[in-house]
Amino acid sequence: MRPLPFTGLLTAAALLAAPILTAPVAHAVPSETTSPTEYASGSTNAEAAPSSPGAPDDPEHLPGEAGYGDLVPADLTVPAGSPGADPEATPGPDGRVPHVCAGRKLLHHAHVDAAYVTRVDDTFTVTVVDGRKVVKDPNSVCVRLAPDARTSDSQEVSRMVVPSGGLFNFIGKPGDIVWRAPQEQIDNWRPVWAGIGAFDTAHEVAQPEGILLDEVKLSIANSSGPGAVEVWRTVGTNSLSRGLSSDPSLAPLSLQVGSHGHWNWTFSKAGVYRLDMVASYTSTLTQRAVNSLPSTITWLVGSDAEVGLPEGTTTSLTPIGTTTEQVKEKMIASGELSAEETPAEPEPPFTQAEARKQIEALFGSTAKAPASPSSPSHYVYKGTFKDDVRAGVPIKRVTLEVNANDKPIPGEPILEIPDSLKQTTADGDRWVLPTSGEHGSLGFDFTQMPADLRSGPAVYSVDTFDGPKGGRYIAGTVTDGAMNVTLDTTRDPNRGFTVDAAAVPLAHVFTKPGVYTVGFNIETRDKDGNFSYKSRSAHFVVGDAAISALRAITAENNGEAPSPSPNPANPDADAPPSGGVQPDNPSIPDPANPSTPSRPGDSAIHIITEGHMDQAMSLKDGKAEVFVDDTADPRHPVHRASGTFAYAVPDSTHAKIPAGAKGYSELAAAAPEGVWSLPETQLEGIPWVGFSTQRVDYSQLSSKGVEVAMRNFTGPGRLVTGVSSLFEGFTPRLDSTKPDMVLHYLFGSHDHQAFYFTKPGRYSTDFVYTAHLADGSTIEKTLHAIFLVGDDAIKRGAEPNPSPEPNPSPAPNPEPGDTLPIDELVAKLNAESHRNWTNPNNGAQRPVQPTPAPGTSPSTGSASTGSPSASASAPASPIENPTAAAASLAEGAGQTGTPVTGGSTVSGSLLSSNSATGAESTTSDSDASDASSADESQSSGVEGLDFADSSQSGESTTRALTKPATPVSALLNPERGSASYGSGSNWWQWILVGIAGSGLVGAGAWALLLRKRVNGRARRVR
């Protein structure tokens, strides 16, 4: 046999080692002509946003203008141990050390992203955005929060008083004064307008690939400073979301790739704060968490003297006329702030009468309530694919079938969770429905959605949620007695996923007694990247009082007197349950086959259901254009021309305006039953609409800049846009009844406002942009926009001549006495209409069913979704990165962590731990019944619970959710965090490395041997 040459052996050994020793390199590809989520036929009205080259000194990021700031002298020193002293510096003979910000730029009176997830020199990291310029080295800047005031009235805006009411208790006690960088824009970014972003399309040359579900996590891994740090945002007047905290118990903040938003940053004391930011994502290729190395972001909070700067270093500050201490005195005098907090009254017992009231509020009337189940059932939400065509292109569309005891049902599952399943924890009572047992179960089954038909994971989520006041719904998988939380109605995003074609059995936890209605959604992309989804709701009746109340209502609706002592039923495992919609009643809609279109956006005009939308004007060399900059898919931004799009405003956004809400009195009078809204801040599953003049060359304009007005308005109600402030309330900016209102943009601006609609239906208007040129002339451009308000309007689509609208149904009736926040009542738009609008159960007569007593129902004996056979049938291969020819992030771009599921990939959670290695988001999500609590956002809600099946006996093996492991050190190129391995437990990687090394050594030895033989033969020949 002819021996291999030396080069062949070396090549073979190198190929063996290559999969371990190399990592993908990030690179960009030109923008495609249309987005993969573009559903408009022909795509003639939407074109890809033009690609731009990177900055000369930063090819990964777009050029951008830096914001305002001051430069700290490079030779500034302070006494060691004093405010501002560099803690890592060695004191000189005079006992002084460099100031921590010596030679750095102070970022203030400007737009700043104080935490920005991106890549720098191909490394996954966290840095800062200065104005519109990405800062490659965060150690070159310091964020400055200095004493500052509004120019209009000289009121201080750099500090705030902690209000009464308990919502802000995580910041401090009511009446405490803390430093605040506000989320709202004040006087062109005073004192500093600090945001958070991740791969924002305004900054990135190319979007990254290889990030599972396009989701990254961000957290403060460590902080040093004199006080506590909290990052949060208010939404409406009665809701807030927590994002980051110096408290390590707060779970990381979840961010979507391409996102950006502004938050309140509060500091309990003045001084120097050094925040070590850590980001993470889960690799689509390996299903492992990849962590960045910590990036230290430095804040200087307080006066120059309080942060060790010479007086006058921080410039362009407005003198304070009204201090925050004076504001506090006014709040006390007006009764807005109580000098002494009133202790909370104990919660009254939840009686059958209270349960009946809650059921009436939830469903509109007792006649519309679902029927109690005749027996427990094991429900499975089964996802499958069906062949379909979208815009002439064959696709695999998601379908959803609900099975009860292995038989499909047309209605909605309903489960009873009696008080016998109640457990008491340090956080209060919890009702726990295990993954299987005598009281029924509910889980998901994706075994009919194999990985080779998908280009992404199968995702399950909660779209809509209604329940008792203060109620929280939590669900997750259970392993060895510990819950891996995947669904939580106080978190956003509220979802879990599975990469393999697997069954996902779930345990369910409820924090309050009452009836819960949960809208479940499943979604994925087929192998060609086409997105589709399907939704079905379920009802959970929690606690004996609620069970008894609903059984009594069911008997009344059936024309029977309720039985005080119902006899246990003789269950029939083959019979579908009696709860929800009755299959033999054709007058009741069948949620399994809704009449809604398969997906908003299949009509000729593109219907925008979610994502970042900037209604933009561009002006360069005298040429002006207006369009919608659609970055819902940040990898494929699309410019949508005037009149080619419509915004969907679903019924889930409807809410009453709280009584006494500042600035809302006129709007509340116009819509006493509530308004539909698009939010001022970005929320998942809803369009986020703004205005942008950042593409306008202002050097061509006069001091008047650009104006935007609303003209030619038509619609069934009134449209009002505006912005809200924590303490100033709502300020209208545009109003369809006041055509003289105009927006003024004196420089390149990016402005998001809330949009409020007083009635459902189809609205259309022209946004007229007027650019005032330096020579006194003007250029006027019109952007025609359509808003489809309410589920019925969305279903009818955006036809030029829509059919006459029926009389609108009465507005959803919230729980009496519980007014709702305005903006953050938005769940992702789903295939079903909002519960209070469709009324799937019209109260028709139901067959009489024997009803068991609460907590005494025997098991049907049917297998649950956690059966071994279901899991065993799942293919083991992970889904590969579907887009190799794009900017890529992989394990070589950051530190690797543990697999998301801790082993073989069966199912995973985006809300599974408390670390940056793949953890839960903490942004709260208020629902239509105010059934969420900001105070609970620090707790997983499941500590100390027993998730064993109710039929099991013996000592519980429950344990609390595990704490995160700290990010592992990089093994290769540690200064860039390019780790290729996770932990020492991956022994097989080290064996392969050994094999590769042995192969290289063997190849060299073989080559030397061959060379000696050849030389020996040559000598013999001579």
Image (cartoon, rainbow, N blue to C red):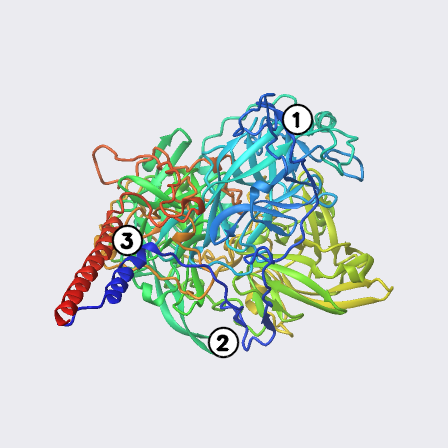
Give the x, y percent position of residue 718: 71, 57
**Could you classify mark 1 by the number of other residues whose Cα lies within 10 Å: few (under 14), some (14-19), or many (20 or more)?**
some
**Residue that mark 2 sits on:** 391
Q: Earlier in the sequence, mark 2 or mark 3?
A: 2
Numbered label attached to residue 549: none
Give the x, y percent position of residue 597: 49, 69
Q: Residue at x 29, y 60 (%)?
A: 14
Which numbered disc, 2 or 1, marks the residue closer to the eye? Answer: 1
Which numbered disc, 2 or 3, marks the residue closer to the eye? Answer: 2
CB contact under 8 Å: marks 2 and 3: no
CB contact under 8 Å: marks 1 and 3: no
Q: Give me the C-alpha separation between circle 2 and circle 3.
A: 36 Å
Which is nearer the eye, 736 or 810? Answer: 736
Above-or-below relation of 781 to 320: below
Residue type, numbered disc 3: Thr
Q: How many marks?
A: 3
